[in-house]
Each structure stands twice: as C-alpha cells, then as structure tokens.
C-alpha cells in the first residue's frame, strides 16, 4: 500500500501510427512494501487505473521510496 | 485531399495489409493510424509504422504512376524485449519487404509496380528516446 500517490495527469496525443498516452505520477511507498513488491526500473504499474512505467526510484525519505512513473507506451520518433 | 496524399494513404494501407500477411505476429500500422473502418488507437510497443512520403514523384507526365518514398519503422520497448528479439523481428520484416508482391491490391484499388528496399535498417536515436527504433527506407512505384 502506498503512503501517498500524486494526482494523475494524462493526455492522449497523436503520433505517427496512432495515439500516445502521456502522463506522469509519483508514489511514495514504505521500504517494506517496496522490498516485498520487488518493483524495479522499467516495470509497469497500474496507477489510478492507468498503465504507468517506473522511470526512477529514489530513497530520499526516511523509511520510504519514491517511484517516479512516466507513460507505459513509447512514442514513434520523428525522423 | 490531394491525389498524392490519397495515393500515399492507399499505399500505407496496402503495404500494411501485405506485411501483415507476411509477418502475422507483428503489428503494422499506417502513419495516420487506423484503417478504412477504424480510427487511430493507442499503441503499445512492439509495433511497426509504415509512412509514405506526401510528395511522391510522378516521373511520367502522361501516366498516373508515382514513385513514393516509404519508411517502415520498428518500435520496441527495451524493458520488455531484449535486443535479440528486436533483431529477430527486424530480420522478419526485412525478409517480408523483399517479398512484397507486385500487383493489384483490390482493397485499396492500388497497383504496386515494384518495391526497392534501400539497404539494411538504420537505427535511430531521438533525444528523448525510450524505445528501440530501426527504420527501413524503400521506394515504391504505384498507381491508383
């Protein structure tokens, strides 16, 4: 269970080939929860009903970890 | 919509149709997304985007034949697919591109006269890249 979960802000934008759901959110979880979940960089989590990918994990808080998540999808590049 | 744009869209849909037959496990989508029947949808890698240039050459003024530049871009997610699997899909697409049959594509009312793949795939690395991308470039002669 998370200590806190930011408000989730997502937007769907066009990209070559289809649509891309962009967004970000951060979650603060207790160290025990973090260890039990075995979550790692690159994993996909369902946050407030949306698929989000773990982009960064920080341990700035006392006894907590912060999971900073971005979109699960990736954009088609322009070239 | 100009005739060139119309041809480009038809060509993207026709190539996707043929590539889906040749590589059924891979998802091919036209650059503007969707199909004749469906709107564009949200995509999760792996997928391959087929994009035809909007300014095709028309080398013969008295014929409705266009020479179109086309890119075929494979997009995979490195966290979910090792480089070997990406390379394997890339090999399948390369073989399929060399086997695209000439002839009439009835669903798009488009004649494909020939297809020339310009060398091996080129990896691209955009600044904000989170994916693994490789692009094939080809020239396609078509009329419709």
Image: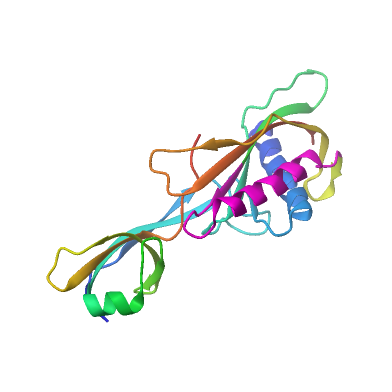
Color theme of the render: rainbow
State the residue at coordinates (54%, 55%): B82
The reply, left or right, for residue A55 in relation to residue A16 is left
Q: Residue furthest bottom?
A: A1
State the residue at coordinates (19%, 64%): A59
Residue B12 image offset from top left, x and y in percent: 68, 43
Q: Quadrant of the C terminus of chain B?
A: top right
Residue B115 image offset from top left, x and y in percent: 78, 33
Viewer-nearest residue: A64 or A21: A64
Q: Residue furthest right?
A: B103
Residue B138 image offset from top left, x and y in percent: 69, 32
Residue B73 image offset from top left, x and y in percent: 59, 42
Viewer-nearest residue: B77 or B8: B77
Q: Which residues are magenta?
A: B73-102
Q: Is residue A2 visible?
A: no
State the residue at coordinates (36%, 73%): A38
Viewer-nearest residue: A70 or A15: A70
Q: Quadrant of the N terminus of chain B?
A: top right
The reply, left or right, for residue A33 in relation to residue A50 is left
Q: Is residue B90 visible?
A: yes
Q: How many marks?
A: 0
State the residue at coordinates (81%, 37%): B112
Q: Quadrant of residue A39?
A: bottom left
Q: Quadrant of residue A8?
A: bottom left
Q: Is residue B76 magenta?
A: yes
Above or below: residue B119 compared with residue A21: above
Q: Quadrant of residue B11?
A: top right
Above or below: residue A77 compared with residue A48: above
Q: Is residue B133 magenta?
A: no
């Amino acid at each position: 269970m998370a200590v806190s979960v930011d408000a989730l802000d997502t937007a769907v934008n066009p990209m070559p080939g289809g649509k891309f759901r962009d967004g970000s959110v951060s979650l603060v979880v207790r160290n025990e929860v973090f260890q039990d979940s075995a979550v790692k960089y690159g994993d996909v989590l369902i946050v407030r009903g949306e698929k989000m990918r773990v982009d960064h994990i920080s341990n700035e808080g006392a006894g907590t970890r912060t999971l900073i998540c971005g979109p699960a999808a990736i954009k088609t590049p322009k070239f | 919509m100009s005739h060139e744009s119309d041809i480009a869209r038809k060509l993207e849909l026709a190539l996707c149709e043929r590539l889906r037959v040749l590589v059924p496990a891979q998802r091919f989508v036209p650059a503007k997304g969707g199909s004749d029947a469906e709107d564009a949808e949200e995509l999760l890698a792996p997928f391959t985007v087929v994009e035809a240039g909007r300014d095709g050459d028309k080398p013969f003024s008295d014929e409705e034949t266009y020479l179109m530049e086309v890119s075929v871009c494979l997009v995979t997610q490195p966290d979910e697919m090792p480089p070997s699997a990406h390379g394997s899909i890339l090999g399948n697409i390369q073989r399929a591109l060399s086997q695209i049959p000439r002839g009439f594509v009835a669903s798009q009312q488009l004649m494909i006269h020939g297809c020339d793949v310009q060398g091996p795939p080129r990896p691209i690395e955009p600044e904000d890249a989170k994916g693994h991308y490789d692009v094939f470039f080809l020239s396609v002669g078509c009329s419709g």
